Amino acid sequence: MAIDHLDGRLIELLAREPRIGVLEASRRLGVARGTVQARLDRLQSNGVIRGFGPEVDPAALGYPVTAFATLEIKQGQGADVRAHLTTVPEVLELHTTTGHGDMLCRLVARSNADLQRVIDRVVGFDGIVRASTAIVMENPVPLRIIPLVQQASED
Amino acid sequence: MAIDHLDGRLIELLAREPRIGVLEASRRLGVARGTVQARLDRLQSNGVIRGFGPEVDPAALGYPVTAFATLEIKQGQGADVRAHLTTVPEVLELHTTTGHGDMLCRLVARSNADLQRVIDRVVGFDGIVRASTAIVMENPVPLRIIPLVQQASED
DNA sequence: GCATCTGCTGGGCACTATGCCTAGCGGTCG
DNA sequence: CGACCGCTAGGCATAGTGCCCAGCAGATGC
């Protein structure tokens, strides 16, 4: 479950240069190819590495506006609201959180004006009592995992 | 900049089975290998596909608790706060948002108790006036992009 | 109508990586 | 001490990659 230093270096290497193969990785890390292969298999079946899906930039698809919406849900309507939000493509992520029966979701839109349409679609549903939205202006720290991997590999 | 239907199918295919190569992808999509290669190159230099980094699960690294913190920042301290938060490995993501000079960040921790330590470290900084934290209980919609890609590829 | 350009096809080539195997070697643990 | 485990180092057939080419269809410009 915990990862060691070699695992950490392997993950870092894959994060920096994702398209390298097992053989090249083994050369960079100074270990045998079979070792890298075994580590990779283990990390994947462990669930530490979930996959290598392409990272798509919504801005490049024409959705440059990101926002976070906090939703207040009517008691007992959680499941319906979840199902509804799943059908909205602009909802990239949805969490249920502690607090007043709240949910937090990440939205994207084509423009600030378009965001209104997305929000209307999101909150135009019976179980949602109130929504408050924060538009993202800057993203000083994009989603990252390497610092955490480094910390986790020092045990 | 916009993507067409073939681009959309290619991205979907890569998302479902990330480890397939260009040749296998061309077979699945029923087009020539060179076409897939050209599309992939274009998508990457466009910035639509940012990369193929490994998706690491913080829970599997021993950080099963996720939280979102809303930070209220003292006027003019934004840059310092950003620099401070960048040094905290448990800060996975940071956005500046509209509102009262606010920031929103995603945190992880080893446990609910450990979250206290992380929050103390995050807010133990001069420029931060107030913080309110929401702990994530469930994640009904994990970060996804496919529905948006499908919508974007229908023009 | 005609020339040009772009994107896709289908193929060929040398090189490289992969998946899968074996044998050996140094640790650790009961 | 013997068994086991992880790493090394190598061999081998197969498959994929990067890179080339010629041909062809549709759009664009003159």
Image (cartoon, coloured by chain):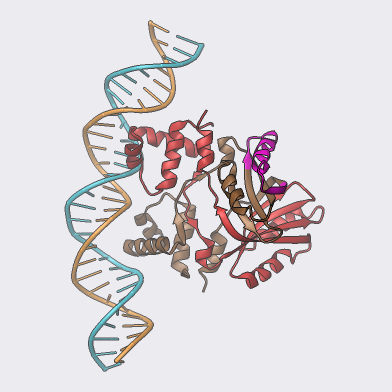
Chain colours: A red, B brown, C cyan, D orange
Q: Residue at x 47, y 46 (%)?
A: B54
Q: Position of residue B53 (x, y in %)?
A: 46, 49
Would you say A67 lies left or right of B27 here?
right
The vertical placement of D7 against B137, above or below, is: above
- Count how many numbered circles sit on residues in the image: 0
For the view shown, which residue lies furthest in the front direction? B76
Q: Inspect the magenta stretch and tell me whether residue B20 lies in it.
A: no
Q: Residue at x 57, y 56 (%)?
A: A139
Would you say B136 lies left or right of B3 here?
right
The vertical placement of A27 against A110, above or below, is: above
Q: Inspect the magenta stretch and tell me whether residue B122 lies in it.
A: yes
The residue lying toward the viewer, choosing from A10 and B129, is B129
The quarter of the displayed image where residue B119 is located: top right
Q: Position of residue A98 (x, y in %)?
A: 75, 46
Would you say C30 lies left or right of B130 here?
left
Q: Residue at x 56, y 65 (%)?
A: A64
Which residues lie in the magenta part? B108-133
The residue lying toward the viewer, choosing from A70 and B10, is A70
The residue lying toward the viewer, choosing from A68 and C8, is A68
Quadrant location of the N terminus of chain A in the rendered image: top right
